[in-house]
Image (tube, rainbow, N blue to C red):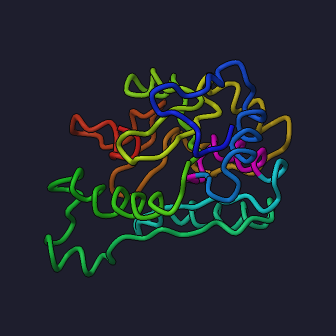
Amino acid sequence: MTAAALDPQNPPDLEALSAEEVIAWAHEHFGDQVALACSFQQEESVLVDILVRDRPDARAFALDTGLLFAETYATWKTFEDRFGIAVETAVGPTLEEQAAAHGDELWKRDPGACCGLRKVEPLQRTLSGLDAWITGVRRDQAPTRAGARKFEWDERNGLWKFNPLADWSEQDVWARINERDLPYHPLHDQGYSSIGCIPCTQPGAGREGRWQGNDKTECGLHG
């Protein structure tokens, strides 16, 4: 079956496949039109390792919001050095452009709008040039992700989506990192489970350290 023949209303069931098998299937059917969205968190440590072992010229991209931790940029370089991959960059407006249009520190007044400008729009531009993307979404990360499938049609963005680690636990992720001595984001050792932009990230388990003080649980990339 070719990628063009896939039916969004009846996608192949990949739930019995391992993460390695899902990524191999993705490369087989989508070639260089599938790429990993890399946020340099623990899930991406595992996924980039699998990705490049399956296909050394595999594609990955990162959203550089201009508000990432110094440790995130350092991990970015470490990933490229260790895995031999050039992570493509997607960017939104500069902080100066955003301030001119919306005022200073938009993330304090309207975090949803800030995420839209700095993350969602750059993601959508990147995805518009792809047929499928790969994510580190796991079902146990949040209630909004509990229904994630290993392969599904992404109606929001109009392309296919792979979640190879959907059925993994956080313990599974760390076991693989330790087993293969993979590089990982150093802020995980400081109590940060989920790491995003500096103004909106605090230490915490799961996703409880994100957007503290409001009812926001997703930036808009996955829901």
In the rendered image, residue 154 lying in the magenta stretch gets the answer no
Q: Quadrant of the C terminus?
A: top left
**Where does residue 10 sit, x and y in percent of width and height?**
51, 25
Left/right placement of residue 193 relative to residue 223 reads right
**Where does residue 185 sit, x and y in percent of width and height?**
63, 51
**Where does residue 34 sit, x and y in percent of width and height?**
62, 53
The residue shown at (43%, 34%) is 207
Outermost residue toward the top in this view: 16
187 or 58: which is nearer to us? 58
Q: Quadrant of the N terminus?
A: top right
- SS majority, magenta: helix
211 lies above or below 34: above
Q: Which contiguous range is marked in magenta?
A: 37-51
The residue shown at (76%, 39%) is 177
132 or 205: which is nearer to us? 132
221 lies above or below 105: above
67 or 119: which is nearer to us? 119
Specify the quadrant of the image occupied by residue 171: top right
The residue shown at (70%, 69%) is 86
The residue shown at (39%, 48%) is 157
